[in-house]
């Protein structure tokens, strides 16, 4: 079905090619169809994941990926390709082992959360105390938790709307460890924030409140969480031996990689698109966020290949150190927050199809969004709303009132893979990647050439 | 669809229950429907996987599982429950790490093959030399292999017929390591024999030819095999650091667990069904072969619950140490090979639906197989052939000419999970498990009561 649609579009291209495009929308449609014929996104993400591997924030691997990125972006024909560095707190994973010692001895698969504390070298052994939610754990008396291994169970539904699953449950990973530590827990293990059923735990950063000493904190793979719940259901005391040896590395250097297509009238403000270059350390980050950097870059590459120069400068940013707390995004906003940006957007929800196009722009610029939607209709992109959610790395700019473009993409399987060892190249669907890339090509071209003023909105401190 | 069918059958049971069954087929149909109403298989496999965990051949965990089995089978109401021990060669997994050191440093996920040799404690580092098949590796000059890490790639198709995938490719795991060792390889890594795309390697036993010193031998997860192939495709020399520290443990004790429903006329020979109790060490062995022991036992449990005694004794065998070379099966055949067995079968291909019923019996007994098929038709079980393949643990009996029943089951996803960390309880579909259990209940009841002679066939040395 999808392939048939693409074939049809490619055929229509051949007809369209007989007459030179005239209007902005005709140019954008031509660009859209050129991506359907030749999309660089797969090549970029294949090359990135194969040649750089995992790219943990602040690590030598992330630094290596920046060098790789400069070569790749230069080779693709972008201008002003550069690295802009900033500092981040370093952390590295060590050994991670968990073992039910009683009543039914067996191993469990887990992964330390980013910035987890460590156990002593020989590990710890303690009784497990389960809670079905963060709230239940928080409400429990400290004496029920002190010296125990807290286990938080929950069920993350497979939903398209992140506010109904990931955003809602996220405090179990980001906040519960600090709360458990403050209540005297020996360690905390959580059911992974995920929707799969494989022995692949979902890592992710956690945040320690001021004055709280980090405790060992890890996420169990979902089958292992199920298993631990079954073992607990027998009603006997359950003890776990846990050994986690991560360590903090002090201050390290990270960086953003920037590349541009210079516009003919830079005074009109920048159009910014990108993704984040860093990944978690368990996999090569194909979905999170190799796909995002690849497809936004490939969209711009299609513009380079068209031979036409945009009016506004198109700036591609591969943000560093997103995963540990959008450090790259904050460094970018600190440096460029006062520079005029016409429209900004990030791709950071995998490689699925774009379902609808949302935005957050002034009402007088909605005509330009509608213009994009007319060109995107053949790709199945539906009309969204003007209250779009920014992807993480554009949050600091959106907070400053910079107009946002927010393509809303199919993410039903995103949390099968997110932050797991399974986030590898084979998970990317090439057809969906191409539809997504073509959407961004249309967005970039129309945004870079539209007559809109793209004035800033009021400050948006709520993000 | 499936649930609707089951609901229909359950309804028809209620009607059937109004009149006492008379013929053997009516009794079998009644039993079939009783399983659709109440199947013990899920409870057994849930309990086995939760309370015993992984059960590696010869390990303390397998011994613990035998004790658990005796309690469980006794509690279910079986008679003559006992453990029969035998010796096996011991082996245990150690640390397993692999890392591409050049040209693109990154980690790979793998698992040592059973009876793999070890690297020195600090590991080895060597260049990788890829081959697309065992035959290509075997044909290569020794000098192309000496001191290198052999890497065998292949593609295992998702097929129902094992002879077209697993059986055909199996020598890559069982034989290639020994051949690579004899040609001077430093180590061998193979693409896992599997059909999934997760970071879960497929282990399994390998066999060293007489006089060959074992080398480190491991299977890469499929995404890692893909990745290594992509890295090699860049045309630069690829080196891997490999650390595997498994060790042989000398002679250990394993055992079969046997349970019976005594027949009213034991002189008619035993009807034997079962599965294997041991599992690989990476998971709890829900599919391989917790499901098999659970569903054959649950089928017999339905007979116990019916209150009717079979004419022939029904013997349930939970074989030990299948995975490392059907040691339990050979011990059983050595002890009981001369005892009359009317019909034998094993379930060892997961928990899927039975698609057809094959057998290997004398022509005069085919009427009894047809009788089973009449009762199984409502479950969607189709007619097979009389050249059925025995599951591993009944091979030694079938070689002696013992008549075989061979339910042929849906195994299209079996090699997604087989021998991986992902072989966990959540992978079992309860509806399919119930259809499979009901099929075995019909088989057992008709086999245990039929007027067939079930004479032995000629010796079948080909298996």
Image: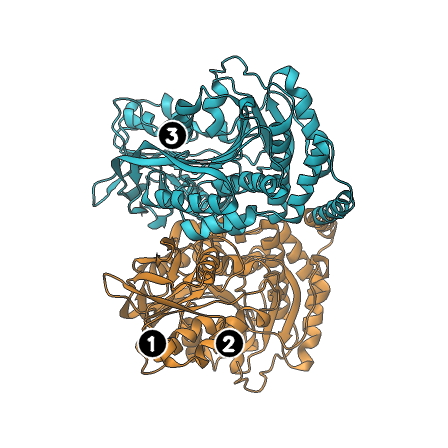
Chain colours: A orange, B cyan
Q: CA distance from mark 3 to mark 1?
A: 48 Å
Residue B132 in percent (x, y) is at 43, 30
In this figure, which residue is indicated by the disc labeled 1?
Answer: A146
Report the residue that reaches farthest toward the top: B458
Write down the residue under mark 2: A395
Q: Residue at x 58, y 72 (%)?
A: A163
Is residue A222 positioned above or below A6 on the image? Answer: below
In this rendering, would A10 be left or right of B325?
right
Seen in the picture, residue A80 relative to A211 is either above or below; the reply is above
Residue at the bottom extreme of this rendering = A458
Instruction: Please name which of the two marks, 2 or 3, marks the residue nearer to the observer.
Output: 3
Q: Residues within 10 Å of mark 2 (few under 14, many from 20)?
A: many
Give the letter of the chain under mark 1. A
Q: Which percent across, then down, holds residue A104?
A: 38, 55
Front-most of residues B380 and A443: B380
Tell me if I can see residue A260 in this picture.
Answer: no
- Dot 3 crowding, Cα within 10 Å, few <14, some 14–19, many 20+: many
Q: Secondary structure at mark 3?
A: helix
């Amino acid at each position: 079905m999808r392939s048939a649609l693409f074939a049809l579009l490619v055929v229509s291209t051949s007809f369209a090619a007989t007459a030179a495009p005239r209007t902005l929308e005709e140019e954008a449609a031509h660009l859209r169809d050129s991506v359907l014929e030749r999309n660089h996104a797969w090549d970029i993400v294949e090359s990135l994941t194969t040649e750089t591997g995992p790219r943990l924030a602040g690590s030598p691997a992330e630094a290596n990926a920046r060098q790789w990125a400069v070569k790749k972006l230069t080779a693709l024909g972008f201008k002003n390709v550069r690295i802009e560095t900033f500092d981040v707190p370093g952390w590295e994973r060590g050994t991670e082992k968990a073992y039910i010692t009683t009543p039914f001895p067996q191993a469990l698969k887990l992964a330390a959360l980013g910035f987890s504390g460590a156990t002593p070298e020989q590990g710890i052994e303690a009784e497990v105390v389960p809670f079905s939610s963060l709230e239940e754990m928080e409400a429990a008396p400290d004496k029920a938790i002190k010296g125990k291994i807290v286990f938080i169970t929950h069920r993350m539904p497979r939903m398209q709307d992140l506010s109904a699953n990931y955003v809602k449950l996220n405090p179990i990973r980001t906040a519960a460890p600090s709360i458990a530590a403050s209540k005297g827990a020996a360690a905390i293990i959580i059911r992974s924030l995920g929707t799969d059923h494989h022995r692949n735990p979902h890592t992710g950063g956690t945040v320690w409140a001021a004055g709280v000493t980090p405790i060992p904190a890890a996420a169990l793979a979902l089958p292992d969480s199920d298993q631990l719940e079954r073992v607990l259901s027998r009603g006997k005391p359950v003890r776990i031996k846990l050994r986690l040896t991560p360590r903090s590395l002090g201050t390290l250097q990270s960086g953003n990689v920037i590349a541009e297509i210079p516009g003919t009238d830079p005074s009109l403000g920048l159009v910014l698109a990108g993704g984040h270059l860093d990944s978690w350390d368990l996999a090569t980050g194909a979905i999170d966020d190799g796909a995002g950097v690849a497809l936004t870059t490939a969209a711009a590459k299609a513009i380079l290949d068209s031979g036409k120069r945009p009016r506004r400068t198109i700036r591609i940013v591969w943000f560093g150190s997103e995963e540990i707390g959008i450090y790259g995004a904050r460094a970018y906003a600190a440096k460029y927050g006062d520079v005029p940006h016409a429209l900004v957007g990030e791709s950071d929800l995998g490689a699925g199809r774009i379902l609808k196009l949302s935005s957050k722009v002034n009402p007088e610029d909605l005509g330009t969004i509608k213009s994009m939607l007319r060109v995107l209709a053949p790709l199945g992109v539906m009309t969204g709303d003007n209250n779009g959610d920014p992807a993480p790395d554009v949050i600091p700019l959106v907070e400053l009132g910079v107009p946002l473009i927010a393509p809303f993409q199919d993410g039903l399987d995103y949390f099968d893979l997110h932050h797991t060892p399974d986030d590898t190249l084979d998970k990317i669907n090439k057809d969906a990647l191409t539809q997504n890339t073509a959407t961004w090509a249309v967005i970039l071209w129309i945004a870079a050439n539209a007559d809109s003023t793209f004035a800033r909105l009021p400050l948006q401190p709520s993000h």
